[in-house]
Amino acid sequence: MRSAEVHNYDFAFRQAAIGMALIAPDGAFLKVNPALCTLLGYTPDHFTLPDLLPAIQELSRDIVKCGEWLQSMKRDQHRIDQHYYHPSGQRLSLDIRISLIRNEAGKPEIYFTQFENRTQMMQMETRLHYTETHLHEREDSFMQLLDGLPLSVLITNHGQIQYANPAGLRLIHADSLEAVIGMSTDDLVDAADHEILAERKQRHYNNRPIGSVRYRIRCLNGQLRHVEGFSLKITYQKKRCVIGIFKDISDQKLEEDRLMQSEKLSTAGQLAAGIAHEIRNPLTAIFGFLKLLRTSSQNNDQYFAIMESELKRIEFIVNELLVLSKPQVSHASKPMDILPLLDQVITLMNGQAALKNIEIVSAFSEPSIWIAGEANQLKQVFINLLKNAMEAMPQGGIIRIHALSRNNEAFISVQDEGCGMTAEQIQALGKPFFTTKESGTGLGFMITHNIIHNHGGNISVQSVPQEGTTFTVTLPVISEPEAASS
């Protein structure tokens, strides 16, 4: 660097975050920046005194020696480590970099010096060195702790067992530590969980946390056990290893399986009750129409059509368990006008509504609303919604059904004047077996939600306690020409 260039760096010199100084070959400080004053604990005036303070004078003397060495070696840059005592008494470790600045003739004129505080780094290195030097003293105490631990402990290196505590030896039915030293974890962990084991090894090699795990292990006597635990990286016998701490959860796993099986049986029983309840509705309608047919001499084609439809719906409801167990399965959909289906559902439910002093009122804003759907499933949705609305109105009232289309979506709402629901009850809707009724399974809304979801729509709820509830079903619409071409 030439001396003429120094002035171009004046701003950067003053604003630099590390300490900087321009020092003459005789050791005089020509210029210092604010960062250096802060680092060394002195004002700029202290660096221009005729008699330098001892601490500053020592720094100056060491820099001059380094500068002279650079000239003799015909080099332009060098660095030295220097200990410095701050006026506060703190001992600092400084990294000092010295660069020769030459004049136009190429002769050394100024020592451009940078000071960096490495005290914290040196302290950390000292701590690490202390830890390493005292590790072997602690290892004996550590091993005594592991030997007395009631949990099973395994230490591995590259997937091979280096140590097992007595509890670990008992778990895998090993007679001695020598019987497992060098044994591969692939031989210990059951083949069904080798993929989990491989993933955890990869985490270790990529310096990522290994975390907790559940394994099935194959003991030396051939017995299969379930274990749960976690793994950490440690240093063992001067090698980077992994320590795993496990507990035997075989009895706990057996109990979990028993509870799960019991829950499945309970679920199956409640599903059967729910499905039987769903079948009762169309049977009631069919019996009602049969009584009308016996006393009527008119053309009853409409009654026969509804009865045939209801019998088919019974067959569908019997198989509805598939909707719950496999909600992702898609059902055959076809273009259909949703409004005639709503009219049919209203006709079907009017009889039950009249018995409860309830009137069902419909309002459709368009002559037709075309969607892609499965008629039996959507019919069940609106029967469920109407049935729930009627059960919420023991004193009678009006149920309003509105249907409109907007922004390529169909909106069908069922509004009752019943007891309403709280925000907590709305939040719990759709959870298995949650119901606001005295006797119910909660499956009706669960089935309804799954059907709407499978049709690409959603269902929302608005309710005010003691005023009523509105369920709104949203479904994607298709154009009528598209429907006609299909």
Image: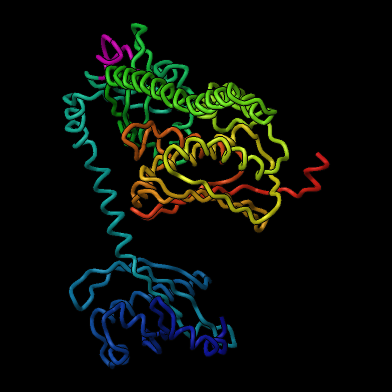
Residue 299, by quadrant, is top right
> Which residue is painted at 36% across and 37% down in the image?
435
* The residue stretch that appears in magenta: 168-181
Expressed as whole percent of the image width and height from the top left, the position of residue 331 reads 64, 31
**In this view of the protein, can residue 305 be seen by the observer?**
yes
Locate residue 98 relative to residue 486 in the image: left or right.
left
Dividing the image into 4 quarters, which one contains the N terminus? bottom right
> Which residue is painted at 62% across and 42% down in the image?
343
> Which residue is painted at 27% across and 69% down in the image?
92
Residue 170 colored in magenta in the image = yes
Residue 314 colored in magenta in the image = no
> Which residue is painted at 39% across and 28% down in the image?
157
Residue 111, by quadrant, is bottom left
Expressed as whole percent of the image width and height from the top left, the position of residue 316 reads 58, 24
Residue 407, by quadrant, is bottom right
Foreground pick, 426 / 283: 283
**Image position of 89 with respect to 483: above or below:** below
Expressed as whole percent of the image width and height from the top left, the position of residue 208 reads 43, 42
Q: How many marks?
A: 0
